[in-house]
Image (tube, grey):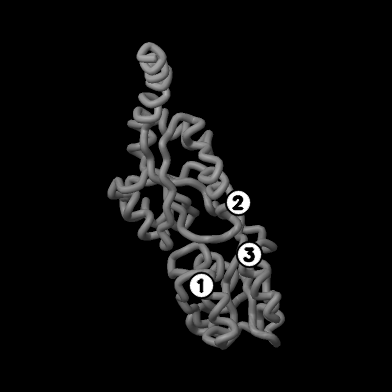
Amino acid sequence: MAHFSLLFVLMLLPAVVGAQSLPKVRMAYTSINIQMTPIYLMKDLDLPRKHGLDAETLMIPVGSRAIQAALAGEIQFMSSGGVANINANMSDGDFVGITSTISTFVFKIIGQPGIKEPSQLKGKRVSVSRFGGASDFSLRYALDRWGLLTEKDVAIIQIGGEVEGVLALPNKAVDAATISEPFTTIAQREGFGVVADLNRLNAPYTLHGIGTRKSIIRDRRDVVIRFMRAY
């Protein structure tokens, strides 16, 4: 019996040692929406472990906070878009975007009944999740294309997130909201209409890719390759 127990322990030992020795990484995503599906799947299927990583996935709801956490070394990878990457580098941050899941805008402007087209946004309040974020950049880009001036023609309201944008519509806190799926479908079911689909602007924009520190790519290249294979 003793010999059997010893054999059993020896058989388990390589697996235990292997699990303990896996490099640990932390990854953050910054919003809850359909674009984050690859991250949800990666987490649920524990794909990093299949590629030799012990990964923890957490939510940091504001991109700028996630960037700060990455620069401080608290996380190694995060979902990031063009605006986050550019802002980090303009402030001399050790940060870079290494892939893009989506290459254009995914947001729609959903408005109160009666607002049918972009020209009717003049004099109205339109929500975004956060100033400086992807929805904010997308809306400002669209308004410029339509010849509408921010602040003068359209008031941009920082609301906190896409969930808050959906809730602001029935409360009439805003006249329109800049949101993406699945929240656009939810809002439409509640009787609000699509004022504009920003995807149709065909603007090249890196959205919901993966970002990390340049120093991690330099010093832990193997970890980055394993993580990106999992992703």
User: Badge 2 local density, few (<14 within 10 Å), some, or many (20+)?
Assistant: some
The disc at residue 103 is 2
* Residue 181 placement (x, y as % from top left): 63, 63
- Vertical relation: 153 (above or below) 140: below
Image point 40% across, 58% down: which residue?
Answer: 60
Instruction: Name the element at disc 3.
Output: loop
For disc 3, the marked residue is: 182
Instruction: Name the element at disc 1.
Output: strand
Asked if residue 12 can be seen in this view, the reply is yes
* Residue 23 placement (x, y as % from top left): 37, 32
Image point 56% across, 87% down: which residue?
Answer: 172
Image point 68% across, 69% down: which residue?
Answer: 185
* Residue 151 placement (x, y as % from top left): 48, 81
The disc at residue 128 is 1
User: From the viewer's perspective, is 14 left or right of 47?
Assistant: left
Of marks 1 and 3, which one's residue comes earlier in the chain? 1
Q: Gap between marks 2 and 1, in whole Å? A: 20 Å
Instruction: Name the element at disc 2.
Output: loop
Q: Amino acid at mark 2?
A: Ser
Q: Are marks 1 and 3 in contact (CB under 8 Å)?
A: no
* Residue 160 placement (x, y as % from top left): 45, 72
Of marks 2 and 1, which one's residue comes earlier in the chain? 2
- Vertical relation: 137 (above or below) 72: below
Q: Count every numbered label the image shows and give the total.
A: 3
Question: Which callout, 1 or 3, points to the residue nearer the camera?
Answer: 3
Q: Amino acid at mark 1?
A: Val
User: Badge 1 local density, few (<14 within 10 Å), some, or many (20+)?
Assistant: many
Q: Are marks 2 and 3 in contact (CB under 8 Å)?
A: no
